[in-house]
């Protein structure tokens, strides 16, 4: 079961910086068959997609040396996939 209180706390004032700092934890909190409100789902998808694009464009700005083997980058990719599935299922 998704810990909604913790997820809401991590995503309350979501921006690129907060998402990067909390990507791994947010990814771990998101489970299959979850029910999120549409606004949170859209925000997570858009911000994750934008941030991943910004990291790929300039990884050194985000202190990421290896995009292929970075847990935050993997978490962002997972969040995007989960939100895409959410849009398809619901």
Image (cartoon, rainbow, N blue to C red):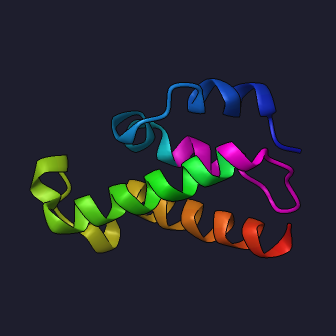
Seen at 59% across and 26% down, the residue is 12
Queried whether the magenta region covers residue 55, the answer comes back as: no
Q: Is residue 5 left or right of residue 48?
A: right
Q: In the image, is residue 86 above or below residue 88? A: above
69 with respect to 41 (left or right): left
Is 38 magenta? The answer is yes
Horizontal placement of 9 versus 54: left or right?
right
Residue 64 % position (x, y):
20, 56
Q: Quadrant of residue 86?
A: bottom right
Q: Specify the segment rendered in magenta.
A: 24-39
In which quadrant is the C terminus drawn? bottom right
Where residue 70 sits in the image (x, y, percent)? 34, 61
Rendered view: 59 above or below 69: above
| x, y percent for residue 17 | 33, 36
Q: Which residue is at 16% across, 60% downward?
A: 59
Vertical order, 12 against 26 (above or below): above
Number of numbered discs overlaid on the protein picture: 0
- What percent of the width, then of the height, locates residue 58? 13, 61
| Vertical order, 54 against 1 (above or below) | below
Please tell me which residue is depicted at 19% across the width and 48% down the height of the picture: 62
């Amino acid at each position: 079961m998704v810990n909604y209180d913790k997820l809401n706390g991590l995503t309350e004032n979501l921006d690129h910086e907060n998402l990067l700092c909390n990507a791994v934890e947010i990814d771990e909190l998101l489970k299959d068959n979850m029910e999120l409100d549409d606004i949170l789902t859209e925000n997570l998808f858009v911000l994750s997609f934008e941030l991943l694009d910004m990291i790929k464009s300039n990884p050194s700005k985000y202190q990421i040396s290896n995009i292929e083997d970075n847990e935050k980058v993997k978490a962002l990719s997972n969040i995007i996939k989960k939100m895409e599935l959410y849009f398809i299922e619901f």
